[in-house]
């Protein structure tokens, strides 16, 4: 949707309308509360309790109104800005993830010394005989991003725990 001036005004009107309705709903809800019954049950003067409810309803209404104005006054991002936003920018790997089979095998290989990080390459490599990692560069990055290995391929404490979780799950599959 392109936000020209007419669409912008419609958007602002819609946001303000929603905020006003929220405020009215709060006031209606406050009117339906049996303040006297509540006041008697907790030992408070009913007139004083009604003042509190009215003040709270007014405060909520004012907040809803100012929120509507704040939202309406915000400029939506331009189409080219929206297109360039990375939808996964907040997503990140977590050190407590369960390693995939490929990641678990890499952690085991690094721990045993069968695999190493090639100096200066940021990629895994086989040491001696045995199969090499299938995607050495991406696998290295996956392990680093989860803080499971150091830049030179040593397992971190989180990496040792990840390897342990992977081995526990692998043993249950057998």
Image (tube, rainbow, N blue to C red):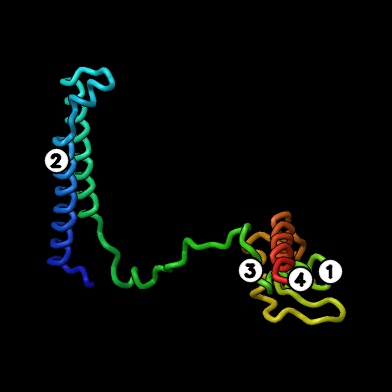
Looking at the rendered structure, the secondary structure element under dot 1 is loop
Q: Which residue is mark 4?
A: 117
User: Between tags 4 and 1, which lies in front?
Assistant: 1
Instruction: Check residue 28 in the rendering and tell me which mark sits there, or answer none.
Output: 2
Q: Are marks 2 and 4 in contact (CB under 8 Å)?
A: no
Disc 4 to disc 1, how far (Cα)?
10 Å
Indicate the position of residue 156 as horizontal and vertical percent values.
73, 57
Q: Look at the numbered disc 4 and give the secondary structure of its residue.
A: strand
Label 2 Cα neighbours within 10 Å, binned few <14 / some 14-19 / many ≥20 = few
Near mark 1 (Cα within 10 A), the count class, few <14, some 14-19 or many ≥20, is some
Disc 1 marks which residue?
A: 113
Asked whether, in this view, residue 142 is left or right of residue 119, the answer is: left
* Callouts 3 and 4 close, C-beta under 8 Å: no
Q: Position of residue 99 (x, y in %)?
A: 66, 66
Residue at mark 3 to residue at mark 2: CA–CA distance: 54 Å
- What residue does disc 3 label? 142
In front of the other: label 2 or label 1?
2
């Amino acid at each position: 949707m392109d936000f020209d001036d007419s669409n912008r005004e419609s958007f602002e009107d819609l946001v303000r309308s929603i905020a006003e309705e929220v405020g009215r709903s709060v006031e209606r809800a406050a009117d339906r509360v049996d303040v006297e019954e509540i006041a008697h049950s907790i030992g408070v003067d009913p007139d004083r309790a009604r003042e509190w409810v009215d003040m709270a309803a007014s405060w909520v209404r004012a907040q809803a109104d100012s929120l509507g104005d704040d939202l309406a006054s915000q400029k939506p991002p331009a189409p080219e800005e929206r297109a360039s936003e990375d939808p996964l920018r907040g997503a990140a790997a977590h050190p407590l993830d369960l390693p995939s089979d490929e990641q678990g095998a890499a952690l085991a290989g690094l721990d045993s010394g069968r695999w190493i990080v090639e100096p200066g390459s940021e990629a895994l490599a086989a040491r001696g005989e045995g199969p090499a990692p299938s995607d050495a560069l991406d696998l290295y990055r996956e392990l680093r991003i989860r803080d499971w290995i150091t830049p030179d391929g040593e397992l971190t404490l989180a990496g040792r725990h990840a390897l342990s979780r992977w081995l526990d799950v692998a043993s249950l599959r057998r």
